[in-house]
Image: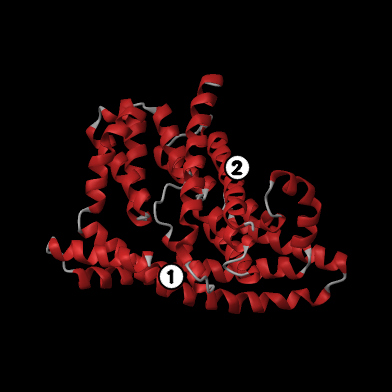
């Protein structure tokens, strides 16, 4: 997939440069490579700090407590899976890890969840769960804040209200679209 | 103050619960280093292509073509590449957003819009591919259109909210 994207990016850029007569543009690939390393190095510092804070949150039992809190709500959204303990515990584990931004924990739990959902024949809920995972529900956008800090933002987290509102609207749109489309094309 | 208060309250909560807080921070930093290490090769592959695209003038050309549509929707046309790459690849979107943020400034309207778009969305098509193939589902039916609809709402609301909060 990415091979095609990358190839497409290069070819269109070269065609555009030839069309606009901008032949020195080709040298920018070296600048890009240097910038990739600078960007990654400045990003790693804040990234490690937040990764440590999240590790601490997990060891304090934050993810487990959140899973328990989410059970009633998720039970209503996924009634079939709620009847199956293996599917439901993977489901709550995935959603709480996503809320806390623990991507490394979210994906394995999500994979266990969809496999169990497929096994018990909850295909509609499998689709809904995937839609939920393709939207961002992270409460604290630590990677974005790290990226902004690396670029010299005065207060990297000041975008938090906008990120939370946009995430909320997007999740609601995804779930609504899933319910509507399921009615139209069952 | 938010970052310091968050970390301080986590440290306190950890001490109260008898968690080895220092060791947790170290373990987290180790995991963060692994993430950064894994992030570098894709960024090294993608940054040159994105820099080439900008230097070639195509990004501006594309932005100029799409400007009527984008301004009607209230989205800055500079974000066109980010919007196209976001559902496909997380690292490509991150590279595109970081380019916008460094070029226009982290506290500029475009820099903020790029950050909010990146922070409130996921790599939709990649995530859907992982879960559907893990579950052995061949026909995803309504899931992909619904997920892309969520992305569209995310991009529009990100642009509108940023203009509302920091549009001046």
Report x, y in % for residue B76: 69, 54
B138 and A42: which is toward the camera: A42
Q: Is residue A157 left or right of residue B148?
A: left
Instruction: Reply above or below: A44 against A90.
Output: below
Coloring applied to the structure: secondary structure
Residue at 25 percent across and 57 percent down: it is A58
Label count reads 2
Report x, y in % for residue A49: 35, 70
Q: Is residue A24 left or right of residue A84?
A: right
For marks 1 and 2, the one nearer the N-term is: 1
Q: Which residue is mark 1?
A: B36
Res. B2 mark:
none
Q: Is residue A131 visible?
A: yes
Q: Which residue is mark 2?
A: B152
Residue at 53 percent across and 61 percent down: it is B91
Local crowd at mark 2 within 10 Å, few (<14), some, or many (≥20)?
some
Local crowd at mark 1 within 10 Å, few (<14), some, or many (≥20)?
some
Q: Is residue A109 visible?
A: no
- Secondary structure beneath label 2: helix
Specify the subunit that label 2 lies on.
Answer: B
Residue at 27 percent across and 70 percent down: it is B25
Q: Is residue A39 left or right of residue A70?
A: right
Circle 1 or circle 2, nearest the eye: 2
Specify the subunit that label 1 lies on.
Answer: B
Residue at 13 percent across and 62 percent down: it is B16
Instruction: Reply above or below: B88 against B7.
Output: above
Q: Find the residue positioned furthest to the front.
A: B168
Instruction: Reply above or below: A121 against B112.
Output: above
Distance of label 1 from label 2 (alpha carbons): 29 Å
Report x, y in % for residue A157: 45, 62
């Amino acid at each position: 997939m990415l091979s095609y994207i990358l190839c497409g990016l290069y070819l269109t850029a070269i065609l555009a440069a030839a069309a606009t007569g901008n032949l020195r543009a080709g040298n920018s690939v070296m600048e890009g490579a240097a910038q990739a390393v600078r960007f990654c190095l400045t990003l790693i510092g804040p990234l490690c700090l937040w990764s440590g804070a999240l590790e601490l949150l997990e060891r304090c039992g934050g993810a487990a407590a959140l899973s328990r809190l989410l059970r009633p709500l998720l039970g209503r959204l996924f009634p079939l899976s709620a009847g199956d303990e293996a599917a439901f515990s993977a489901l709550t584990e995935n959603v709480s890890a996503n809320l806390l931004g623990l991507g490394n924990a979210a994906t394995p739990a999500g994979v266990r969840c969809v496999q169990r959902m497929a096994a018990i024949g909850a295909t509609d809920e499998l689709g809904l769960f995937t839609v939920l995972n393709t939207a961002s529900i992270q409460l604290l956008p630590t990677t974005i804040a790290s990226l902004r800090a690396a670029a010299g933002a005065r207060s990297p987290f000041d975008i938090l209200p906008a990120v939370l509102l946009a995430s909320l609207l997007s999740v609601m749109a995804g779930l609504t679209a899933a319910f509507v489309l399921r009615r139209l094309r069952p | 103050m938010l970052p310091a208060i968050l970390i301080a309250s986590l440290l306190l909560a950890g001490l109260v619960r008898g968690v080895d807080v220092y060791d947790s921070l170290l373990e987290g930093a180790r995991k963060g280093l692994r993430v950064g290490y894994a992030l570098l090769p894709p960024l090294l592959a993608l940054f040159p292509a994105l820099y080439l695209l900008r230097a070639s003038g195509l990004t501006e050309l594309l932005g100029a073509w799409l400007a009527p549509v984008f301004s009607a929707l209230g989205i800055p046309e500079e974000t066109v590449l980010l919007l196209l790459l976001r559902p496909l690849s997380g690292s490509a979107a991150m590279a595109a957003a970081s380019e916008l943020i460094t070029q226009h400034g982290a506290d500029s309207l475009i820099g903020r819009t790029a950050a909010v778009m990146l922070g409130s969305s996921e790599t939709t098509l990649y995530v859907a591919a992982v879960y559907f193939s893990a579950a052995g589902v061949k026909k995803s039916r309504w899931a992909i259109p619904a997920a892309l609809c969520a992305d569209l709402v995310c991009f529009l609301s990100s642009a509108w909210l940023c203009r509302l909060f920091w549009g001046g």
